[in-house]
Image (tube, grey):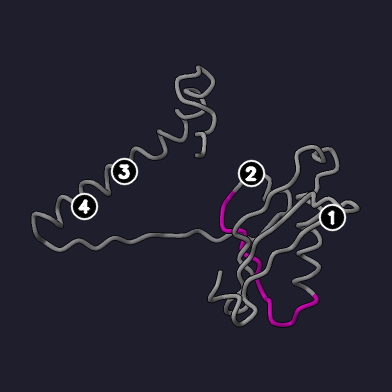
Amino acid sequence: MESYSEFGGCEIHIMWHYDKPIACEFSLITDGTLYTLKIGYDERYASCSPGHLLREYLMKYCERRSDIRFNNLITDALWHSQWKPKAYNLFHYYFCKPTVRGWLAYVYQSTVLQIHPLWLKLKPKLRNWNIIPDRFART
């Protein structure tokens, strides 16, 4: 944040209701893209969807600025689909040296990639059965 703010590449947008902040968004701007890293809102105002209102403001804000061509929402959260964004598949390639260490890294990565989709399906069920907590407490 410190290095981006030196050249105006760090922005925090806040939506206010009188003197109370009800939604906030943190972004970084680089190479013509506004990266929305975090957005949050006061849940007491959930009925008026302050996060969506702030998102609408940000879309218009990006249109007015000639130096921003893209707004990258970073994640694929379900609520993003309501904005019908253009999405691109992201691919990761891993190269491992032909050594024992490289082979172990390959086996580990392959296992993680195979287990992850299963974990995504299993996690909500484990939460419903109270086997794992809904969210971990932050200290």
**Circle nearer the N terminus (4, 1):** 1
Could you tell me how far apart the alpha carbons at marks 4 and 1 are, in whole angstroms?
Answer: 50 Å
In front: mark 3 or mark 1?
A: 1
Instruction: Name the mark on residue 30.
Output: none
Left or right placement of residue 131 versus residue 40 in this view: left
User: Left or right: where does residue 37 sit relative to residue 106?
Assistant: right
Q: Secondary structure at mark 3?
A: helix
Identified at 81% across, 68% down, the residue is: 60
Amino acid carrying mark 1 in the image = Trp
Q: Check disc 3: other Cα within 10 Å, few if <14, some if 14-19, many if 20+.
A: few
In the picture of the structure, the residue carrying the numbered disc 3 is 112
Q: Quadrant of the N terminus?
A: bottom right
Earlier along the polypeptide chain: callout 3 or callout 1? 1
Mark 1 = which residue?
16
Q: Which residue is mark 2?
A: 78
Residue contact at pointers 3 and 1, CB within 8 angstroms: no
Q: Position of residue 100 (x, y in %)?
A: 8, 54
**Badge 2 vs badge 4, beta-carbon distance below 8 Å:** no
Question: Dot 2: within a 10 Å radius of its alpha carbon, few (fewer than 14), some, or many (20 or more) residues?
Answer: few
Instruction: Tell me where residue 77 appears, x and y as whole percent.
Output: 61, 47
Dot 4 amino acid type:
Tyr
- Of residues 55 and 121, the one drawn nearer to the viewer in this rendering: 55
- The residue to which callout 4 is attached is 106
Mark 2 or mark 1, which is nearer the start of the sequence?
1
> What segment is highlighted magenta in the picture?
64-76
Q: CA distance from mark 1 to mark 2?
A: 25 Å
Disc 1 crowd, CA 10 A, few/some/many (<14, 14-19, 20+)? few
Give the amino acid type for the residue marked by disc 2 in the picture: Leu
